[in-house]
Image: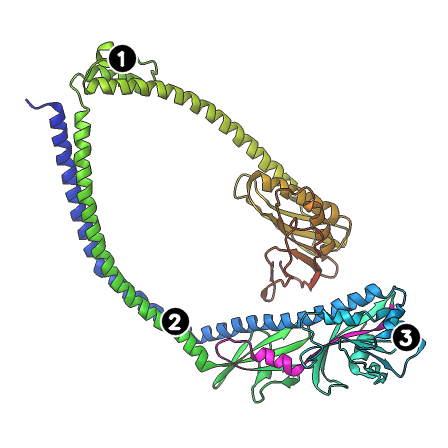
Amino acid sequence: MKSISVKVRKTLMTSLIMVIALLTVIAVSFIYIQKNEFIELNKKSAAELENFTDNVMYENIRQYARDITTACGSIVENNYEKNSSKGDSVADYLLSIYGNEPDEAQGGNLNGAGFIGGITEEKREDFYRLGSVRDYIKTVPGYNSDNLDTLDIFVVTESGVVFDGTDSFLGEDYGDLRNDSWYILGKEAMEPVWTDVIVGSVTSQENIDYVVPLIYENEFKGVVVVSAPLIEIYNTLLNIDFEGVIDVVLTDSKGERVIGGEGYAIYDVENEGDVIFNREYCISRYDVKAAENTVYFIFDVSKVLSAVNVVQTEINNMNNSINSSTLRFIMTAVFVFICIAVVFAVIAAVYSKRTAANMVNPILELCRKVEAFGKGNMDIELSDEILKSDDEVGLLAQKFSVMSNDMKDYLNKITKITADQERFKTEMEAAANIQLSLMSRDFPKSKEYSVFAFMKAARSVGGDLYAVFKINDENLLVSVADVAGKGIPASLFSVRTKVYIQVYGEMGLKPSEILERVNERLCQNNDEMVFVTAFLGILNIRTGLFSYSNAGHNKPVVIGESTHWLNSVNSLPLGCMEGIKYKDEFINLNKHDSV
């Protein structure tokens, strides 16, 4: 007579081997059937992709030109802004010392100074009061007093004193620079201004100057000039290393070419972002916002085509590589699957033997106990005969007894945990409702504008927030922000941020001032170093002027006649550091524009 253990082991082994063999045959057959279909599908996809690439070749060239133009234009814009920041820095320094008493100790050093029409008492007083600006000019990044051909910075006062960062005395009867066009332009504008190309009266070279008027107590005191040679600006444009750019043309605010290759049909490019083709080259345009100049980039079409053709070559190479890899993968998959099947058969044999060894003959009573336990009777008591048995049934009975006791403890714990989780879920839902209630929902309504908002936290609560409210009858404040992190800590920090924006926004401050004050408050007691990115703007409902400031947040998108990113200066998020200054920027929104 064969024991139950032997019968069970034999039955399990036979069943498992048959299942493994069947699965192996099915899997291998399926892999081979799919192999040819996969290869043909890959070839077809590659051919369609290559055909698509041919069809959009010239559109790719246009997009390549647009992308390179945007990248190059950003570099040009940044160079202009660097020069303007240098001029603003020197002007700020001068205005900070204008109220000081004259320092006669300056009289012993006339280097870097000159006097228009001779030295008078008024000029001497300006010299004594402002003489330290010469040392400040020397500290301006990029300024080299030994090489003014790349960058020149100087000051001309209304009284007739000239300052720069050189170590040479400019003379007691210096030429009257106050008659130069850039000086007159700055005096009339009464605000920072870029000039068109000007021939320097001293250097006789062509420059583009950034002129900052010095206004102290509502009185014009002179100008600060940052003079950048035109040839340096042009060389900078040519040195922007992008594939296919063969020339650059720069025009002034009147649209007249000032430097760059001639013979290109640049005036056919009417708008920024347009790309035109002309025989062997194409032209794109970028408008420099800072200086009202326009830069035209000339691309060699053959070089751009070669860059695009690389994509087709890579597609073909990729197709061949995929075909080879597919064959290798299929063969490897078959081999691995067979190995896995063999290993699984061995494991199944060992497992079936162990399972059969744990089977015992007197199992009926244990089955009844198990059935009762399954129906919910946790108070299971096995007979001493079964528990003290020295065979497999006894071991199984002991394990079952321990399991029943553990199960009772487990169910008690589960009941308690479930209650705690339900309570926590209820509290989190309440926190989420409270957070949503703090957000603006009853938006101001007007025929001049419409406001829409949506927020969905990654968890029950989070650190996203927005605020929309009218400051007064003429101005509407809008703001979005995102706290670093998620969950309750981010939610609490977002509430602080929302409250501060509401408080300072209702004071009628500028966007930058609101962010600066909110930043100071968030930095206080911020031991966890939590920070928040924020964008805040104020719309003048009557004029459509949208003033805004950005604290490290994603740039918004303006959707109107065209879609573009809303330009904003990159700044640190709120809560990172005290004393951060933010910049106000402006844009006029037209009817039907959306932000």
- Residue at mark 1 to residue at mark 3: CA–CA distance: 113 Å
Report crowding for label 2: few under 14, some 14 to 19, many 20 or more residues within 10 A (C-alpha): few
Location of residue 355 with respect to 186 vertically, above or below: above
| Occupied quadrant, residue 590 | bottom right
Q: Is residue 277 visible?
A: no
Residue 215 coordinates in the image, percent (x, y): 84, 68
Q: Amino acid at mark 1?
A: Leu
Q: Residue at x 73, y 57 (%)?
A: 541
Q: Position of residue 493 (x, y in %)?
A: 63, 42
User: Are the two marked residues, 1 and 3, in contact with CB atoms closer than 8 angstroms?
Assistant: no
> At 14% from the left edge and 35% from the top edge, which residue is drawn?
13
Disc assigned to residue 124: 3
Relative to 375, say whether 98 is above or below.
below
Q: Relative to 168, is 591 on the left or the right? A: left
| Element type at mark 3 | helix
Magenta extent: 219-247
Q: What's the mark number on residue 311?
A: 2
Q: Is residue 230 magenta?
A: yes
Badge 2 element: helix
Q: Disc 2 versus disc 1: distance between alpha carbons? A: 76 Å
